[in-house]
Image (tube, rainbow, N blue to C red):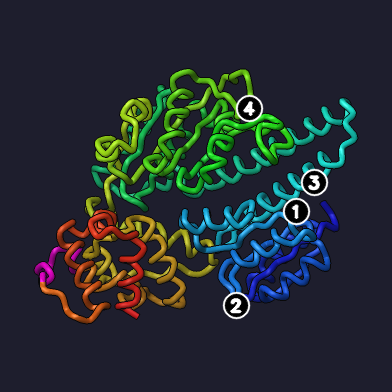
Amino acid sequence: MANEKILIVDDTAANVHLLATVLEPRGYEILAASNAEQGLKVAAKTRPDLILLDVVMPGRDGFAVCRALKENEATRAIPVLFVTAKVEHESLLRGFDCGAVDYISKPFQSQEVLVRVETHLQIARLTCELVVRNGELEREVGRRHEAEAARHAATERLVTLSEQDMQRWGVSGFVGGSRFMRRILSEIERLHHFSGTNVLITGESGTGKELVARAIHCTSPRARGPFIPVNCVAIPGELAESMLFGHVRGAFTGATADRKGWFELADGGTLFLDEIGDMAPGLQAKLLRVLEDGEVVPVGASHSRRVDVRVVAATNADLHERIADGVFREDLYFRLARYLVEIPPLRERSGDVGVLADHFLDLFAAEMGVTRPTLTAAAVQLLEGYAFPGNVRELKNMIERALIESGGSAIEPAHLRLIGRSLRRVHTAREAAPSPSLPLNLEAAEEALIQRALHETSGNVVAAAKLLGVNRSRIYRRFRQATG
């Protein structure tokens, strides 16, 4: 809507310029602040319609700024969207706890920025209208229709984003000629005639589970319906049931209108539940009931609603182990795993690394509008000797960075940023196990323990992190520090 004000709080001028370039052509008035204190002052004085807030800033970070905004009567109702490169579930949950309504990930995608901003501005408009309504039945019904139309439009935009992603990462994105990939493609084709069958996809982080889920959807009769991706880790616990199954007006404080959940939004299409192994036990029971009955009961509703949804779930966890530990329901597992697709890690896809590297080089060179450089033989040899703990996602990021650092010249081994030489040696089993004796230096001792855990798990970072009782990001961080 023209003349609505959007405040961008970011200490990086380039980010402010990029966001303004995307939003100003839509008629929004852009305000900017370069630090936390300035942002709070501008917000209180101008009362913007929406705030885009950077997480990492000098002084007070974005979380502290968001809490201050919500504590101030003048700015409490302004929707806040975090702008962040941190998409770990802990960071997202912390943002929601501070009062943010959504986040926009870096690097920015113009379509994503517009969809999220326009959706939350529309929700804010509708909320304001509902607060001031005069109680007349005709106007109330009209606003409900308007709210439903806005949510439907937002869903359509998100589906459009999914279709655009599919064009880029769809079935054509499956490259490589290994027997593993031929098997997965064969399984996707086999599922074409069984569009009502739930599917469970297993594999390490970064192997492309969502890509397989999208391919299953887009090669099935459900392709004309929506594809709704949901990360189970990022669902705020207190809102999980409402977000999955919807709610009716008055179901809880803040429920000012009926809201469809993800199941109803995915009606006629596919609901992708990523990281299903981390779903709360109480929610697992409700999900099982929906899978058994094909009906959802919105929070606060007295009647169920029928839905036609195929559920494709994915996990990098060992669900059999979680069942044995009593944290995942066995009956839910069998409902989800009507058909099981196992994606191998990149280290087991012999011969695919070079082909994938060439594919990503073509892709990024075209996106950046530069001449595609070549990979030297030494660079290819280095890639093929590396175990890729981050799998295809790590290779993709590595090639994008190498293309930038090479400046258009041939890509050499120096342009390839591996996690660490010592980590690579453990993965490829070219070195003996680390000594069980630990040095007295704390940092050196931590690195030695990580090396030992990686050796004992054959280089599996996820398993090593579990063995050490830490998050795998700590292992990656340690080797980034070790390599400067």
Q: Main secondary structure of the magenta part?
A: loop
The x, y position of residue 153, in whole percent, is 70, 38
Q: Alpha-carbon distance for marks 3 and 1? A: 11 Å
Badge 4 marks a residue whose secondary structure is loop
Q: Is residue 215 magenta?
A: no
Which residue is at 58% across, 35% downward?
Answer: 242
Which residue is at 34% across, 59% downward?
Answer: 471
Badge 1 marks a residue whose secondary structure is loop
Neighbor class of circle 2 (other Cα within 10 Å; few <14, some 14-19, many 20+) is few
Q: Alpha-carbon distance for marks 4 and 2? A: 43 Å
Stretch in magenta: 425-436
Q: Of callouts 4 and 3, which one flags the residue occurring earlier in the amino acid sequence?
A: 3
The answer to which image quadrant residue 34 occupies is bottom right
Q: Which residue is mark 2?
A: 59
- Front position among marks 3 and 1: 1
Which mark, residue 283? none
Give the left or right position of residue 303, taking residue 170 as reference.
Answer: right
Q: Which residue is mark 4?
A: 300
Q: Which residue is mark 1?
A: 77
Question: Of residues 248 and 366, which is closer to you in this image?
Answer: 248
- Front position among marks 4 and 3: 4
Q: Which residue is mark 3?
A: 125
